[in-house]
Image: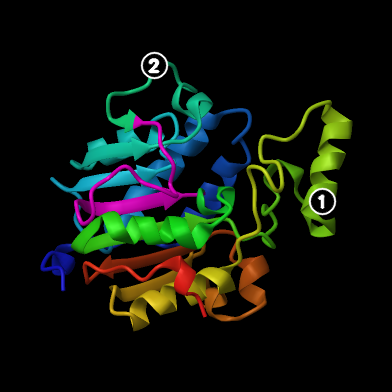
């Protein structure tokens, strides 16, 4: 057990906080600095309920242009980001020295070397989410925290900019977007966006627990108030109502079960 668990800070998962995040989400396209800045700060607060961040090394998979780097640095953490998309790395200008280009499916990081490994809204953008989650557990030190957040496919924003038409099929929604805008969506089904359900990742997480690779498993809807977090435990309902799901757990063993061992 990580000896720092007991000193973690509380996180206020209130209705007011949920409304605040939703209002920020409404200006994601027009004012990304505001939205992603607010999201990064909230993520730091959420992670701190499971582990202190002062002096910790944090690896962010899909770190993007640096919003999370700023938030974690303000919390006293030593941050590094892995981002496969060169456009995302330079979205705010010059790439920071704390980020590098790489794939979440094959992290260029030594096993058991990071205190906190996290990803925010990345899992739905890789074709093999279990493999990426395996990699995140692999690089986390025993006792360290793994934090994974993603948008389930059947949630209202599952199709991203093609929503809500993704409910009629991902490819159909992407084709409709192209006809309307004259270009393929950034989150193009089958190329840069894939269906990733809460049930699928729940099964992955339980396999990790059963194998003794992680402990202290927590699953919750990321943006919901405390009293509504039960929705993530209801099959079917959780796929639509969770909006965004979180898995948090602490690493135990050096050996990580492979995603190829799925049952």
Question: Residue farthest to the top?
Answer: 94
The answer to whether 31 appears left or right of 138 in the picture is right
Q: With respect to residue 102, does 142 lie above or below?
A: below
Residue underneath mark 1: 165
The answer to whether 88 appears left or right of 187 in the picture is left
Picture mark count:
2
Mark 1: which secondary structure? Answer: helix
Look at the magenta stretch and give its main secondary structure: loop
Mark 2: which secondary structure? Answer: loop
Q: CA distance from mark 1 to mark 2?
A: 35 Å
Crowdedness near tag 1: few (<14), some (14–19) or many (≥20) residues, C-alpha within 10 Å? many
Q: With respect to residue 54, does 169 lie above or below?
A: below
Magenta span: 100-121
Q: Is residue 222 magenta?
A: no
Question: Residue farthest to the left?
Answer: 3
Residue underneath mark 2: 94
The answer to whether 195 appears left or right of 38 in the picture is right
Q: With respect to residue 32, does 56 lie above or below?
A: below
Tell me the residue at 76%/33% (across/down): 184
User: Where does the image place residue 155, in percent across and percent down from the top left?
Assistant: 67, 60
Tell me the residue at 36%/52% (across/down): 118
Q: With respect to residue 118, does 215 lie above or below?
A: below
User: Where does the image place residue 51, in percent across and percent down from the top left?
Assistant: 22, 60
Which image quadrant for residue 62?
top left
Identify which residue, 129 or 182, lies in the foreground.
Answer: 129
Which color scheme did the rendering employ for the protein?
Answer: rainbow
């Amino acid at each position: 057990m990580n000896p720092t668990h007991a000193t973690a800070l509380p996180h206020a998962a209130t209705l007011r906080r949920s409304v605040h995040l939703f209002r920020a989400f409404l200006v994601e396209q027009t004012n990304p600095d505001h939205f992603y800045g607010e999201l990064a700060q909230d993520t730091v607060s959420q992670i701190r309920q499971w582990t202190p961040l002062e002096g910790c090394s944090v690896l962010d998979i899909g770190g993007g242009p640096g919003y999370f780097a700023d938030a974690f640095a303000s919390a006293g953490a030593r941050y590094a980001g892995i981002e496969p998309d060169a456009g995302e790395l330079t979205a705010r200008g010059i790439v920071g020295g704390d980020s590098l280009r790489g794939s979440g499916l094959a992290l260029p990081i030594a096993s058991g070397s990071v205190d906190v490994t996290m990803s925010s809204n990345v899992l739905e953008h890789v074709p093999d989410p279990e493999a990426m989650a395996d990699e995140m557990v692999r690089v986390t030190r025993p006792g360290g925290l793994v934090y994974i957040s993603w948008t389930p496919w059947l949630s209202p924003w599952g199709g991203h900019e093609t929503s809500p038409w993704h409910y009629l099929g991902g490819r159909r929604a992407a084709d409709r977007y192209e006809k309307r805008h004259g270009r393929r969506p950034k989150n193009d089904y089958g190329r840069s966006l894939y269906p990733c359900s809460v049930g699928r990742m729940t099964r992955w997480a339980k396999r990790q627990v059963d194998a003794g690779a992680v402990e202290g498993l927590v699953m919750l809807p990321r943006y919901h108030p405390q009293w509504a977090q039960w929705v993530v435990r209801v099959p079917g309902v959780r796929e639509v109502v969770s909006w965004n799901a979180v898995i948090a757990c602490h690493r135990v063993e050096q050996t990580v079960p492979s995603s190829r061992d799925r049952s």
